[in-house]
Image (cartoon, rainbow, N blue to C red):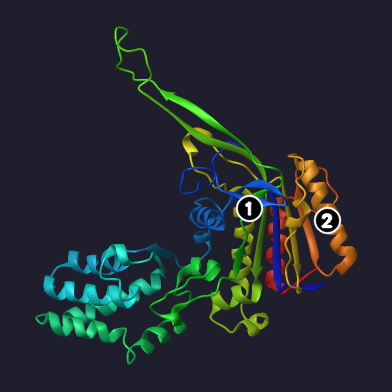
Amino acid sequence: MSVSRFLQIHSLHSYPAALLNRDDSGLAKRMPFGGAVRTRISSQCLKRHWRTADDDYAIHNIPNAAKAIRSRNVVDREVIQPLREGGGIDEEVLSAVEEAFNVGVYGSSGTSESGRQPLLLGLPEVAYLREKADAICRAHAQDAKAAGQSAKDLFGKEERGNFKAFREETALPGGLESALFGRMVTSDPAANIDAAVHVAHAFTVHREESESDYFSVVDDLQGDDEDAGAAHIGDTELTAGLFYGYVVVDVPGLISNLQGCEAEAWQSADRAMGAQVVEHLIHLIATVSPGAKVGSTAPYSYADLMLIEIGTRQPRSLANAFRCPSPAQTDDAAAALAGYLTQLDNAYGVREARRVMSVADCDIPNADRLCLDDLASWTADAIRSGEAA
């Protein structure tokens, strides 16, 4: 039996003619590895698609999983605007409270939208802020200066403890997204949440494969006697690739974030929601595709392989299986993965429980083969029980 301290998820996804993740110049993101340039998908891109997916395994289909909002305008649109629409509050009072709340939430540069960094706040936190703003506005209905000062005090040294206490007493105050992927709040370090799910940048197991796609647009109203040229011409980059992905779940950290307990107490805490989160996450990683230019490339793909390891040792990526570029075929990539894993087992021993799902006929060492549903269920059971066989 292996204690479910760390969960490691390795995957292989194949995409043809796509532009999955662009850089600031509109080209596919890249990285050099093993002396060869690879196509890359950033971890931020991957996490964004997993957390916003809307299907049977969406993370917010989990009961009692509070949502979160990432925005520069949470105070304006989710805290103050509902009070403004409700009527009965003087506009000068609202404006004074709005300014103080923006500074309190976003820091000293929060008075302007351009000065704010997008911040992830849980809906319970948003509701708490709205209640506080409403109470301040009504307590100082005719005195904008007093209302503004009271709002400043809410985030001052004397009152900040109230906001911290609220977070400690509320389930998922920062929402499920924060519990999974963490957040940093520069204006309030006590609101920082350490990520429990660590996501590596995915990269192609082979050298980059790309081409420039030339396209033209025809004007439907253009007559035969008019210029025969296209109404618009352009080009964009398209890539193809077989990507290796790697995700680690720090189970004690996840249970701590979900239940509000100390990470050291994870084995005695309720792990039911953690098990559901992991089950959903595995389905999302396997079946949700990132992708720009969705309408013109349909970049939808399921994982060709997913290997899960559960144990107590520090996690380690299997990326070095592809330091020497692999042929761009699933069978070859799976064989390279299995070969490198065998080398690690010979050097360090086998202390993790393993299961694998694969469309290719491969032999992953010490890993029983399961379908995706059974793989996700096995992993969820390991989190729920605290051990994996």
Q: Secondary structure at mark 2?
A: helix
Side of 337 relative to 57 (left or right):
right
Give coordinates of residue 183: x percent, y percent: 48, 70
Give coordinates of residue 115: x percent, y percent: 31, 66
Q: Secondary structure at mark 1?
A: strand
Side of 208 relative to 54 (left or right):
right
**Residue at image x 36%, y 12%?**
228
Give coordinates of residue 382: x percent, y percent: 72, 68
**Residue at image x 53%, y 47%?**
21
Q: Nearer the viewer, residue 267 or 341?
A: 341
Which residue is situated farthest in the top direction here?
Answer: 225
Q: Is residue 216 above or below residue 105?
A: above
Q: Is residue 297 above or below residue 363?
A: above
* Quadrant where the image shows the C terminus: bottom right
Side of 330 relative to 75 (left or right):
right
Which residue is situated farthest in the front direction here?
Answer: 35
Q: Nearer the viewer, residue 318 or 127?
A: 318
Give, as a three-letter code, the residue at label 1: Ala
Q: Residues within 10 Å of mark 1 (few under 14, many from 20)?
A: many
Which residue is situated farthest in the bottom direction here?
Answer: 158
Q: Which residue is mark 1?
A: 202
Which residue is situated farthest in the left direction here?
Answer: 142
Q: Which mark is residue 151?
A: none
Q: Residues within 10 Å of mark 2 (few under 14, many from 20)?
A: some
Q: Which residue is mark 2?
A: 340
Disc nearer the start of the sequence (1/2): 1
Give coordinates of residue 191: x percent, y percent: 44, 78
Q: Assess whether mark 2 and mark 1 are in contact (beta carbons under 8 angstroms).
A: no
* Quadrant where the image shows the N terminus: bottom right
**Residue at image x 69%, y 59%?**
9
Give, as a three-letter code, the residue at label 2: Tyr
Residue 64 appears in the picture as rendered:
no
